[in-house]
Amino acid sequence: MRRTRIDIINDMLLAIVNKGGAIKPTHLLYKSNLSHTLMKEYVAELTAKKLIEEQPLKRGKNFTITEKGRKFSREYKKMKEFQEAFGL
């Protein structure tokens, strides 16, 4: 079954959470199972919507999840549980 756009966004946010709230771009690429081009598009969208932030490092950068991103992930989880409870 193909992932929806919202599923992909949640997968990316969960990957960041599971790495302690910050993740390097390469790790996010592998964990979210996306092409580099698609990941860049999603990162741009998530950054614009303030769900994640880009943190520069001495070498490279990290992506960190914001409180808004954490809230999105919690609400997504509730929505999925609701769908499953009714067999949708």
Image (tube, rainbow, N blue to C red):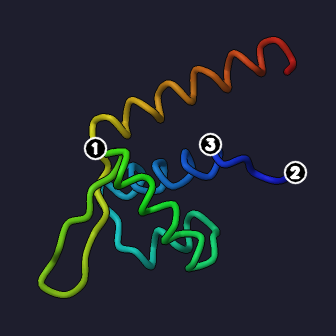
Q: Residues within 10 Å of mark 1 (few under 14, many from 20)?
A: some
Amino acid, disc 3: Ile
Counting residues from the start of the chain, the first of labels 3 and 1 encountered is 3
Return the x and y of residue 50 as percentages of the image width and height. Answer: 31, 45
Mark number displayed over residue 1:
2
Q: Are marks 2 and 3 in contact (CB under 8 Å)?
A: no
Counting residues from the start of the chain, the first of labels 2 and 3 encountered is 2
Return the x and y of residue 16 as percentages of the image width and height. Answer: 40, 55
Instruction: Estimate the spatial distance between the alpha carbons at disc 1 and disc 2, rounded to whole Å.
Output: 29 Å
Residue beneath disc 3 = 6
Total numbered badges shown on the rendered structure: 3
Amino acid, disc 1: Thr
Q: Residue furthest bottom?
A: 59
Residue beneath disc 1 = 66
Left or right: 14 as drawn, with respect to 56: right
Q: Nearer the viewer, residue 9 or 24?
A: 9
Q: Are marks 3 and 1 in contact (CB under 8 Å)?
A: no
Q: Residues within 10 Å of mark 3 (few under 14, many from 20)?
A: few
Residue depicted at x 40% and y 74%:
25
